Amino acid sequence: MDSRLRGNDEAILLAEGQKSAVTEYYLNHGIWPSNNSSAGVASASDIKGKYVKSVEVKNGVVTAT
């Protein structure tokens, strides 16, 4: 498997890990969390892997880069 595919797999797994916190925040507050801190997850730069440098929550959207 080439590194690009492994990177995609890693990004999906790391982003998936934040989805439940984002959903729970929405269910409790009726709005999407504005950032990682609001969602109750680690800072974007602390959620990383070999191929992913950060996972950011911004207005309910989870983005792995």
Image (cartoon, rainbow, N blue to C red):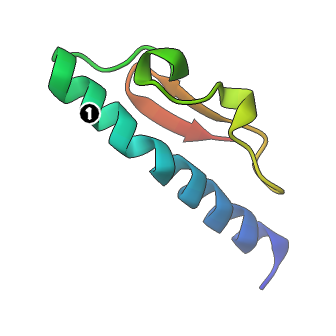
Other-residue count near label 1 (Cα within 10 Å), few / some / many at <14 / 14–19 / ≥20: some
Picture mark count? 1
Left or right of 8 on screen, residue 31: left
Residue 44 vertical position relative to residue 31 in the rendered view, above or below:
below
Which quarter of the figure is the C terminus placed in?
Answer: top right
Q: Quadrant of residue 48?
A: top right
Q: Judging from the image, what secondary structure is the residue with disc 1 in?
A: helix
The residue lying furthest to the bottom in this view is: 1
Q: Which amino acid does label 1 sit on?
A: Glu
Q: Position of residue 54 (x, y in %)?
A: 71, 37
Residue shown at 46% from the left, 24% from the top? 40
Residue shown at 53% from the left, 23% from the top? 36
Q: Where is residue 41 in the image (x, y as percent from the top left)?
A: 52, 30
Left or right of 43 on screen, residue 29: left
Residue 2 vertical position relative to residue 12 in the rendered view, above or below:
below
Q: In which quarter of the image is residue 32?
A: top left
Left or right of 53 on screen, residue 63: left
Residue shown at 83% from the left, 56% from the top? 50
Residue shown at 46% from the left, 52% from the top? 16
Q: Where is residue 18 in the image (x, y as percent from the top left)?
A: 47, 42
Which quarter of the figure is the N terminus placed in?
Answer: bottom right
Residue 13 vertical position relative to residue 2 in the rendered view, above or below:
above
* Of the pair 16 and 1, the residue shown nearer to us: 16
- For label 1, the residue is 24
